[in-house]
Image (cartoon, rainbow, N blue to C red):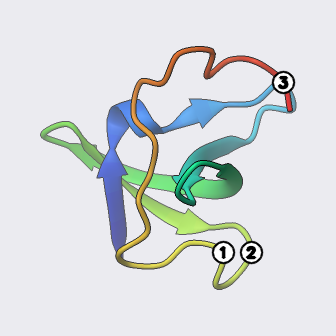
Amino acid sequence: MLAVPLSALSLGADGNSRVQVDLGGRTRRVEVIPGLAAQGFVEVRPARAGALKQGDLVVVGSQGASGGG
């Protein structure tokens, strides 16, 4: 099971949930399936196997996070 801060989760225009993974100067969007939430964290499962793994750095509260790209 993976868990991320609730503020790392965003909802796309297509209605799918996702997180942004920090790649050291770049970011990659990863579609996730959210699960249970508690104490500021939410359980997530990547929609595509292997797209998100333990130790990946997720972006929390970045400026312009709602922008396209």
- Give the quadrant of residue 48: bottom right
Residue tagged 2? 48
User: Which mark is in front, 1 or 3?
Assistant: 3
User: Which mark is in front, 1 or 2?
Assistant: 1
Q: Position of residue 12 (x, y in %)?
A: 75, 30
Give the quadrant of the N terminus.
bottom left
In the figure, 50 relative to 68: above or below? below
Q: CA distance from mark 1 to mark 2?
A: 6 Å
- Point 43% across, 68% down: residue: 56
Residue tagged 3? 68
Q: Relative to 24, is 7 on the left or the right? A: left
Name which of mark 1 and mark 3 comes first in the sequence.
Answer: 1
Q: CA distance from mark 2 to mark 3?
A: 21 Å
The amino acid pointed to by label 1 is: Ala
Q: Return the mark for residue 42.
A: none
Which residue occupies the foreground of this view, 54 or 42? 54
Local secondary structure at mark 3? loop
Q: Report if the CB atoms under discs 1 and 2 are less than 8 Å apart.
A: yes
Q: CA distance from mark 1 to mark 3?
A: 20 Å
- Point 41% across, 59% down: residue: 57
The amino acid pointed to by label 2 is: Arg
Residue tagged 1? 51
Q: Relative to 51, is 13 on the left or the right? A: right
Residue situated furthest bottom in the rendering? 50
Q: Position of residue 27 (x, y in %)?
A: 64, 49
Name which of mark 2 and mark 3 comes first in the sequence.
Answer: 2
